[in-house]
Image (cartoon, rainbow, N blue to C red):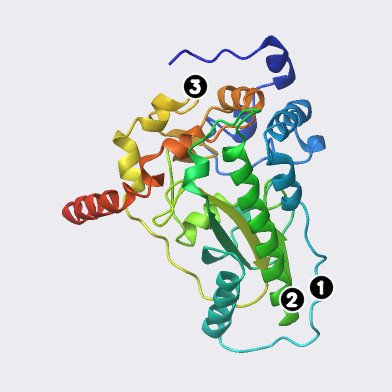
Amino acid sequence: MAKFVPKPETLALLRTSGNPINGLGETQVRRPSPFFWHPPDKHPFGDLQAEARRNSRKCPGAAEAFKAAYQHPELVPVAPEPRGGAPADLAKAATEFALANEADAIGMVPMDPLWVFEGYEIADTWVIVLAFAHNYDQLKQVPSTETNGAGVTDVGVQYARGTRASYALANWIRAQGYHAKAYPGPSAEALLLIPPAIASGLGELGKHGSIISRRFGSGVRLAGVTTTMPLVATKPDKFGADEFCMACQVCTNACPPGAISDKKQMVRGVERWYVDFDKCIPYFAEEASCGICIAVCPWTRPSVRPNLLAKMAKRLAAAR
């Protein structure tokens, strides 16, 4: 594969390295800083973000799909009297509602202040994370082009599902008498989504920096809801994705700008997988978004995932 070289005009928009902003190399634990998908006044990459949006919207179907991701109802007033009931019953009811309203999976976990971006505050005590599975046949057609927008369009479709589902759940909770707020993508706000998704059992962090789900592989998008409703936490799900990534080189080799490291790195006081921002984002901006790493991930392939799960289950059992 020919190495990707960003255009000079793209590099001019990068302006400064995003890796220090993300905390690469830092040994102290801290909250994350606002990043590329936050409002432009919160980071130095506003012009590059705008370029990425313009290029992705050139793909057939993408503009309409992403427009739907930004359309949502107003949040209803919180009912004056809480519904009451045992946390387990409330959690069950919330789960049933979410799964009946477009979510493919759901996790619940107590709020951790480290999941709130610097400059933002969240007073709610629980985080609910919703997962939305990609259409694999469309996802695997990334990177998108001006003649084939299937991949990036499906990204927009899943984000739109996340917007509808998270606002529906937030309004349902508010009608029960508890505060709730929705946090869908693709734009970022106060809530970091991947860490609570992992903590609540929706998957493990992959080498490509995205979550790997037992059910959907890397082909999954997330949305969040924070709330004061008393719930019961769902448990983390360790099924071997992290161990598999240690040896797998598929996404590392497939990444055109070479942004995916084969080793974990220290990021804000935690050793974990990290994707080089300065290499990834210029390619993402020029190529009408990307998604190659999650599309080629062996876990994402429906025909491969069951065998991987069985293989890693045996390996984890043998290691105990």
* 1 or 2: tag closer to the N-terminus: 1
Kind of residue at badge 3: Pro
Nearest to viewer (mark 2 / mark 3): 3
View extreme (left): residue: 318
Q: Which residue is mark 1?
A: 76
Does residue 121 lie above or below 299 as drawn? below
* Distance (Cα) linking label 1 and label 2: 7 Å
Report the front residue among 305 and 258.
305
Disc 2 crowd rating (10 Å Cα; few below 14, some 14-19, many 20+) is many
Determine contact: label 1, label 2, CB under 8 Å: yes
* 2 or 3: tag closer to the N-terminus: 2
Instruction: Give the residue displayed 82% in from the left and 36% down from the top.
Output: 41
* Distance (Cα) linking label 3 and label 1: 45 Å
Kind of residue at badge 1: Val
Residue 61 drawn at (x, y percent): 68, 41
Determine contact: label 2, label 3, CB under 8 Å: no
Residue 47 drawn at (x, y percent): 78, 26
Q: Is residue 201 left or right of residue 298?
A: right
Disc 3 crowd rating (10 Å Cα; few below 14, some 14-19, many 20+) is many
Residue 137 drawn at (x, y percent): 48, 44
Residue 320, quarter of the rendered image: bottom left
Tell me if I can see residue 187 in this picture.
Answer: no
